[in-house]
Image (cartoon, rainbow, N blue to C red):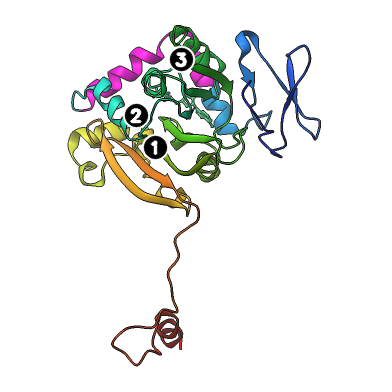
Amino acid sequence: MLSLVDPKDRTPLTLSDDQKTLTSQGGTTYEVLEGGIINALYPKELLAEDAREQYLYDQAAASQRYDRGVSWVFETLDHSDEAATRRFMIGLLELKPGMTVLEVGAGTGKDSALIIDQVTPGGTAVLSDLSPNMLRLATEKLQSKSVDIHFLLANGSYLPFADGAFDALFHFGGINTFSERKQAFEEMTRVVKPGGKVVIGDESIAPWLRNRPSYATLRKANPLFRAEVPLEDVPANALNFKLHYIFGNAFYVMEYTVGEKAPEVDIDLPMPGKDFVDNWRARAEKAAQ
Ligand SMILES: C[S@@+](CC[C@H](N)C(=O)[O-])C[C@H]1O[C@@H](n2cnc3c(N)ncnc32)[C@H](O)[C@@H]1O
């Protein structure tokens, strides 16, 4: 059984004898749905933008529109090779057999099979999403896989896992519309152990292309492409940060390693070659006068 905590107060969740509910120490309960999918969504009444996304993706999944629609989008973007690009993104995670990975916003599982293959044998893949219908399609696709796979409904901004529970984390395609995006970055970093990789991507046209006619049309047609790369939301302990542009440079994907702590500037280190009383702090104080 997957070890879960309450997404709000982070106390351990305990499974009931009939295996139908999980309860936190504070008494909050979370349901186990049909097919063993745990509903760990928090808040129970989602914020407006998250509720809207959940509704839209539930509709898209129910009509079987999602997989074809999204592949068409990538085809329009410089006729990108979707499969190769997804392999590139998953490669950034540096997965190894036996690892434990979390995918946030796994959707219909377009990247999940690649993730699962790389942690096989012996690994664990936890696939989470806001939309029950999207996740159900993923469960159908991934039935035949042989590693430990868990499916759960979870809000990326309130993850039901202990600190450092995962070796790596992947999210692609939803972060631009998360209601609490900065908190989601904090959460997606918190649950990865120090030294583990985090890979996150979504729409954002590379600045040098935005005014080209075809990209300007894309930005007009779909407001999601007007998003900026959310660099200011990256947590302070993100190390070895790299930014890539993919899918015709209309999407970004960032990768970083989770650090034990945030880097610091040593503002008191004496400057060599001076009289050894000058340093950044002294210079800052002088500049402020
Ligand atoms: C564009 S789809 C991407 C799905 C999949 N990663 C892919 O590349 O095909 C975005 C997914 O993010 C999910 N999502 C949106 N907001 C979320 C949130 N706050 N927490 C977790 N998942 C969310 C949606 O339900 C949807 O399945």
Image point (52%, 24%), residue name: 126
**Image spot of residue 163 (x, y percent):** 59, 41
Residue 65 on the magenta segment: yes
Along the horizontal axis of the image, is 65 left or right of 131? Answer: left
Q: Amino acid at mark 2?
A: Ile
Q: CA distance from mark 1 to mark 3?
A: 25 Å
Mark earlier in primary sequence (1, 3): 3
| Mark 2 burial class by Cα count in 10 Å: few <14, some 14-19, many 20+ | some
Tag 1, which secondary structure? strand
Residue holding disc 1:
199
Image point (34%, 19%), residue name: 70
Q: CA distance from mark 3 to mark 2?
A: 24 Å
Along the horizontal axis of the image, is 59 left or right of 82? Answer: right
Mark earlier in primary sequence (2, 1): 2
Say which of marks 3 and 2 sits in front: 2
Residue 114 on the magenta segment: no
Along the horizontal axis of the image, is 215 left or right of 163? Answer: left
Marker disc for residue 90: 2
Is mark 2 in CB contact (under 8 Å) with mark 1? yes
Which residue lies most toward the bottom here? 275
**Pick the front one: 234 or 88:** 88
Does 269 sit above or below residue 203?
below
Does 104 sit above or below residue 273?
above
Q: Which residues are magenta?
A: 55-77
